[in-house]
Image (cartoon, rainbow, N blue to C red):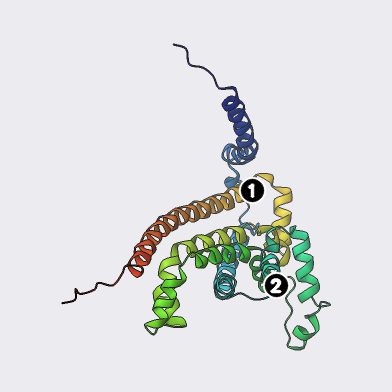
C-alpha cells in the first residue's frame, strides 16, 4: 500500500528547510572559508588580534560579574514586589535587548561621555570613560544584562511563595533565605541566563575594537580578510559553546521545575489533609 503524502507537512518541511538554510548557510560558509584559506597561518603576530580576543574575554568576564551583582536583586524585586508602573519598569529593563547597537552606544555616550549628563561629574573625579576598557565593560553590561535579568525574574517567579513563607516562619530571612532556599531552587536557571548574557556580551567584539581604540586590529581586518575570518571563527566557536551550555542548564532547570511542582502538590495536599479525630466514648 502506497503511503499517502501529506501536502501540508510537505510545505511545512520545505519552509523549515529554507529557513534553516538561510540561518545556517552563512555560518557554514564562514567556517569552510576559514579552514580552506588557513587564515591562522597568514595572521601577523603583531596584528593585535590576540590582544583583542583576550580583551574581549576579560571584559566579558567583568561585565558578567557586574550583571550578576546588579541584576540579581533587580530580578528578585521585579518577580516578588508589586508596585506602580511595574510593567513600565520591566519594559525599560528589557529595552536594550531590541535597541540597535548604534542607538545603545549613542545613549551611553551622551550619558557618560565627556560632554554627557554625567561627564562633568566624572571629570571632576578624574574619570574619563570613552575609549577605555571600562567603557567596553559598561557597554557590554548595558546590552547583555537584560538577558540575565529576564531569566532570573522567571526563575524567581517559579519558586512557590509557600516555600518562602514557611522558611520565614522557621526564622530564615534576607541572605539566609536566598542562600538556603531560593538559590538552590533556581541556580540552574540563573546560570543558564548568566551564560546567555555572557554570550551576548561576547558579541560586542566590535565595541571592544572601537572603545579600546585598537585601530591596529581594525586595519589588520581591512588588509587581511583571511585573518578576520579566522578571528570570527574563534568568536563563533565561543558563542556556540556558550549557547550549548545555556541550553543544557535550561533543560536541567526544567527538570528541577517539574520536581518542584510535584513537591508543591504534595505539600499543598498535606496542608489540606483533615486532622485526625479520636472517637468519643
Q: Percent position (x, y) of residue 273?
A: 32, 67
Q: Which residue is mark 2?
A: 85
For the residue pair 46 and 108, the one nearer the viewer reads as 108
Is 191 positioned to the left or the right of 212 in the image? left
Disc number lying in front (2 or 1): 2
Element assignment for label 2: loop
Q: Which mark is residue 266?
A: none
Image quadrant assignment for residue 260: bottom left
Label 1 neighbour load within 10 Å: few <14, some 14-19, many 20+:
many
Q: Percent position (x, y) of residue 277?
A: 24, 73
Where is the N terminus found, in terms of image quarters? top left
For the residue pair 189 and 246, the one nearer the viewer reads as 189
Q: Which residue is mark 1?
A: 227
Residue name at image x 36 percent, y 63 percent: 263
Q: Percent position (x, y) of residue 202?
A: 60, 59
Which residue is farthest top? 1
First in residue order: circle 2 vs circle 1 = 2
Say if mark 2 contacts mark 1, CB within 8 Å.
Answer: no
Q: Percent position (x, y) of residue 181?
A: 40, 73
Residue name at image x 43 percent, y 72 percent: 162
Label 2 neighbour load within 10 Å: few <14, some 14-19, many 20+:
few
Is 48 positioned to the left or the right of 244 in the image? right
In this rendering, is residue 32 above or below 42? above
Residue name at image x 60 percent, y 31 percent: 17
Where is the C terminus found, in terms of image quarters? bottom left
Which residue is farthest front? 281
Amino acid at each position: 500500500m502506497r503511503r499517502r503524502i501529506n501536502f501540508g507537512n510537505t510545505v511545512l518541511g520545505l519552509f523549515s528547510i529554507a529557513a534553516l538554510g538561510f540561518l545556517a548557510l552563512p555560518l557554514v560558509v564562514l567556517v569552510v572559508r576559514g579552514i580552506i584559506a588557513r587564515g591562522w597561518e597568514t595572521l601577523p603576530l603583531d596584528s593585535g588580534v590576540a590582544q583583542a580576543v583576550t580583551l574581549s574575554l576579560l571584559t566579558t568576564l567583568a561585565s558578567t560579574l557586574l550583571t550578576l551583582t546588579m541584576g540579581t536583586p533587580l530580578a528578585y524585586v521585579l518577580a516578588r514586589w508589586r508596585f506602580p508602573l511595574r510593567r513600565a519598569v520591566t519594559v525599560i529593563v528589557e529595552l536594550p535587548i531590541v535597541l540597535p547597537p548604534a542607538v545603545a552606544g549613542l545613549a551611553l555616550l551622551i550619558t557618560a561621555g565627556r560632554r554627557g549628563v554625567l561627564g562633568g561629574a566624572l571629570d571632576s573625579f578624574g574619570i574619563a570613560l570613552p575609549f577605555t576598557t571600562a567603557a567596553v565593560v559598561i557597554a557590554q553590561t548595558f546590552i547583555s544584562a537584560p538577558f540575565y535579568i529576564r531569566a532570573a525574574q522567571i526563575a524567581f517567579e517559579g519558586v512557590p511563595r509557600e516555600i518562602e513563607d514557611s522558611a520565614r516562619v522557621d526564622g530564615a530571612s534576607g541572605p539566609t533565605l536566598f542562600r538556603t532556599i531560593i538559590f538552590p531552587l533556581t541556580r540552574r536557571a540563573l546560570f543558564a541566563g548568566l551564560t546567555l548574557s555572557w554570550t551576548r556580551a561576547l558579541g560586542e567584539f566590535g565595541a571592544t575594537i572601537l572603545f579600546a581604540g585598537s585601530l591596529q586590529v581594525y586595519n589588520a581586518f581591512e588588509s587581511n580578510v583571511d585573518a578576520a575570518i579566522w578571528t570570527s571563527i574563534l568568536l563563533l566557536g565561543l558563542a556556540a559553546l556558550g549557547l550549548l551550555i545555556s541550553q543544557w542548564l535550561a533543560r536541567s532547570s526544567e527538570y528541577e521545575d517539574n520536581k518542584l511542582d510535584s513537591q508543591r502538590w504534595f505539600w499543598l495536599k498535606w496542608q489540606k489533609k483533615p486532622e485526625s479525630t479520636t472517637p468519643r466514648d
